[in-house]
Amino acid sequence: MVTFAKQSVRNHIFHEITRSLCPECGQVIDAQVLIRDNSVYLRKHCLEHGWHEALVSSDADWYLNAFKYNKPGAIPHGFATAVEHGCPCDCGLCPEHQQHTCVGVIEITTRCNLVCPTCFADSGAGFDLSLAQVESMLDRLLEMEGHPEVVQISGGEPTVHPQVLDILAAANARGIRCVMLNTNGLRLAQEPDFVRQLAEYRPFIYLQFDGVSAQSHKALRGQDLRAIKRQALDHVAEAGLHAMLVATLVQGVNDSEIGDILRFGLAHPAVLGVTYQPVAYTGRCLNHHDPLHRITVPQVLHALEMQTEGLFRVSDFRPVPCPHPICSACTCAYVDGERVIPIPRLLNVDDYLDFLTNSAGPVISDELGPSLEALWSMAAVAGSDKITDALNCVACGISIPPSSNPELSPEQFFMINTHGFMDEHTFDLKRLMKCCVHELLPDGRAVPFCAYNNLGYREQVKQQQESLND
Ligand code: SF4
Ligand code: SF4
Ligand code: SF4
């Protein structure tokens, strides 16, 4: 009998195949999704530039479990492009796209009053969109969505646009449920009168806030902005507005401040939540990075658990079901003085949010389902009427607070979200096709945010706009 040497075994589990990008030439190429040492990697081969591998999840259990939370997408009222060259070259939205626009982003200027070493938009100098252009983009959003949930007025730094107040008024006039202003806070800190003017339009402030140490600010923003951020938030609170802190996280720079950022947010009266964004290496970035060692969504959750001594645990979070559930995770908590109680500790949210297990029909049919779906959504903005109503519905369903005090205010809830934007290393077409965060373009297209930043759409708009301004 012939005997064979024992076959050796690969050091990974092959999970699936998808499409990604060559990080050197940007070509769309096949990519294998591999699981090794409880982490998930994308491995891909470019005919010209060889093999590349990148970490996409530091927790394979989280990654695999996330697929249960994938929910069917909604079809927008209209599309802007046809299927012609194939995904991702037909954005969009083209009829093959799997989700409508939960969040529309309008970059009203490419100018900025900072020149951060890290800026996915590579902002600094450039152009402003005209009010007429922004109005036509808002009208287009209405055509596609009917009643849009959320629009983010972004940049560059939107507060340097001379007509930013008119733009907020134009968004309000179109009945968009929640209008957000994405800002570095510089003008909000330096001009309290401007914040008072802003308050007339009730924008929700989405404030860049990368940490509590001078080093983090200097590394990511080129200067210590701690006093500026606090002053901006104080002015926001005085004006009766609300804010979410938005932290860009870079491994070895500010990942040790994840817990401190949360504590700062919980303590400040203007702040209703924190969004953590592991850095995506697009635009202008800190120089060196190793694609095999980078922060991923579950790593943020584990750090949060460790750095807050369990105030928030990984088990308090669920993937957000409207985009691809690998993209983002969130939780909501009830806040009562010093007590902070995440909703999943009070209620089995999986009875409502696990769409795969419950796909044969709703296990439980009551009013909690729609409210939880509204909370675990990219369109969930803390403090908005819709979200406060949903949180009150859930709080009522779980008997919080006592019936003597039936209505809770927005300040009695806190939301935490982590959103892992993609770059050329981590780009995964299956995620892109279900993206629900869309850049609205002056020519009427809506382009998934990670396509906009990685596939040349941003540069296309810049060229079009520059030729218009010539
Ligand atoms: S990402 Fe969506 S809109 Fe863009 S080409 Fe693919 S399916 Fe179409
Ligand atoms: S990251 Fe924001 S604040 Fe910094 S340069 Fe870019 S747009 Fe300006
Ligand atoms: S913006 Fe990128 S990371 Fe976010 S939902 Fe869209 S594809 Fe996913």
Image (tube, grey):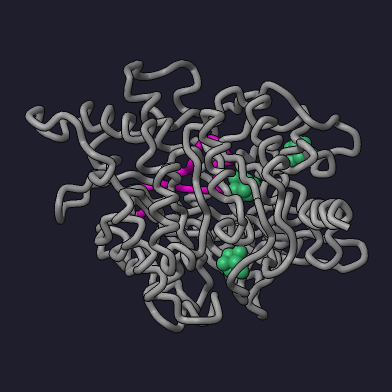
Inspect this view and state whether residue 358 appears.
Answer: yes
Q: Is residue 146 above or below residue 134?
A: above
Residue located at (33% from left, 52% from top): 239
| Above or below for 366 versus 424 | above
Is 348 situated left or right of 126 in this image?
Answer: left
Write the start and end of the magenta stretch as one range: 314-330
**x and y percentages locating residue 289 in the rendered image:** 65, 76
Q: Image point 40% across, 47% down: which residue?
A: 199
Assess whether residue 44 is covered by the magenta stretch: no
Is 381 or 276 nearer to us in this picture? 381
| Residue 195 versus residue 350 in the image, above or below | below
Q: Is residue 319 magenta?
A: yes
Residue at (31% x, 49% y) in the render: 240
**Which quadrant does the C terminus fall into?**
bottom right
* Residue at image point 39% right, 75% down: 226
The picture quadrant where one finds residue 105 is top right
Q: How many marks?
A: 0
Outermost residue toward the left in this view: 404
Q: Is residue 437 above or below residue 43?
A: above
Where does the image place residue 294, in percent across and percent down from the top left?
Answer: 57, 69
Camera-side residue of 56 and 163: 163
Residue 255, given in percent of the width and then of the height, sits at 45, 71
Q: Is residue 91 left or right of residue 229?
A: right
* Image quarter of residue 469: bottom right
> x, y percentage for residue 298?
47, 57
Quarter of the figure that contains the N terminus: bottom right
Residue 7, can we see it?
no
Q: Which residue is nearer to you in this view: 293 or 366? A: 366
